[in-house]
Image (cartoon, rainbow, N blue to C red):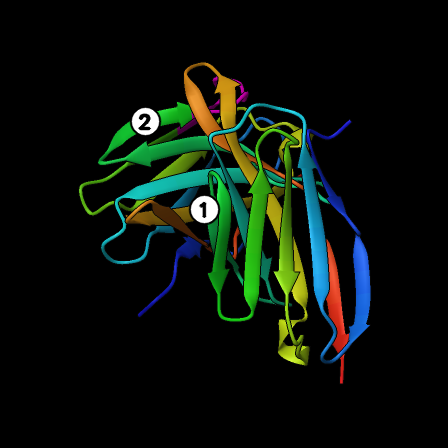
Amino acid sequence: DAGVTQSPTHLIKTRGQHVTLRCSPISGHKSVSWYQQVLGQGPQFIFQYYEKEERGRGNFPDRFSARQFPNYSSELNVNALLLGDSALYLCASSFWTGNDEKLFFGSGTQLSVL
Amino acid sequence: KNEVEQSPQNLTAQEGEFITINCSYSVGISALHWLQQHPGGGIVSLFMLSSGKKKHGRLIATINIQEKHSSLHITASHPRDSAVYICAVVSYLGRGADGLTFGKGTHLIIQP
């Protein structure tokens, strides 16, 4: 089975541009969450989607938006890019088994804003 | 100060040793995850805890909600256990969201 896949793996943009990052969860997983990891720091929660609805949002500006499609894949959009948006963007899918949630992370999209 | 603190940051041990990685947090949580990342690999979850103790093979995770502390233990460690181990807590982040807050990870190397 394929794991969580993210595309593209690397991306270079300039300030002011917008970007769309994509995530395909593991088959059967209905929950997708997005994280930003700046070099040297732990990941920061951005969004969680479940069954195409936003279930949670972290402390990120409204320039960040996301959506989940009927096949449970997801897109993260960032408008008006800033230099500080340069980071590794991680997507995770999850499922519950009993009282245990299992998380699976993709390898991420490395975004560089110049 | 990070809301989730892990110790040690780096740990090198010999094969067969008993390993303990600690995680302390300063916020109220609903659950805690222990995650593993092998070099060049994605992050996978090992355990989710809301109370007590869980065991899977040679891995044991415990949590003390009152003391806001969790530990991950590895018995009979093996070189294939070499990885970064990350503690992440599920807590209220504002704006109606529960989300994960991560520690910086513990880099474990098990030497043969």
Above-or-below relation of B55 to A71: below
Q: Position of residue A25 (x, y in %)?
A: 33, 52
Q: How many marks?
A: 2
Residue at image position (52%, 45%) is B33
- In the displayed orientation, state which residue is furthest to the left: A70
Query: Which chain letter goes with mark 1?
Result: A
Quadrant of the rendering where the C terminus of chain A is positioned: top right
Residue at image position (61%, 24%) is B27
> Secondary structure beneath disc 1?
strand
Quadrant of the rendering where the N terminus of chain A is positioned: bottom left
| Magenta extent | A57-65
* Residue A59 is covered by the magenta coloring: yes
Q: Amino acid at mark 1?
A: Cys
Q: Which residue is mark 2?
A: A54
Residue A39 visible at all:
yes
Q: Position of residue B10 (x, y in %)?
A: 81, 58
Mark 1 surroundings within 10 Å by alpha-carbon count, few (fewer than 14), some (14 through 19), many (20 or more): many
> Secondary structure beneath disc 2?
strand
**Residue A15 occupies quadrant:** top right
* Residue B52 is covered by the magenta coloring: no
The one of B1 and A63 positioned closer to us in this rendering: B1
Query: Which chain letter goes with mark 2?
Result: A
The one of B36 and B47 positioned closer to us in this rendering: B47
Above-or-below relation of B27 to A10: above
Q: Amino acid at mark 2?
A: Glu
Mark 2 surroundings within 10 Å by alpha-carbon count, few (fewer than 14), some (14 through 19), many (20 or more): some
Above-or-below relation of B61 to A52: below
Left or right, A96 with respect to A8, comes to left
Q: Which mark is residue A91?
A: 1
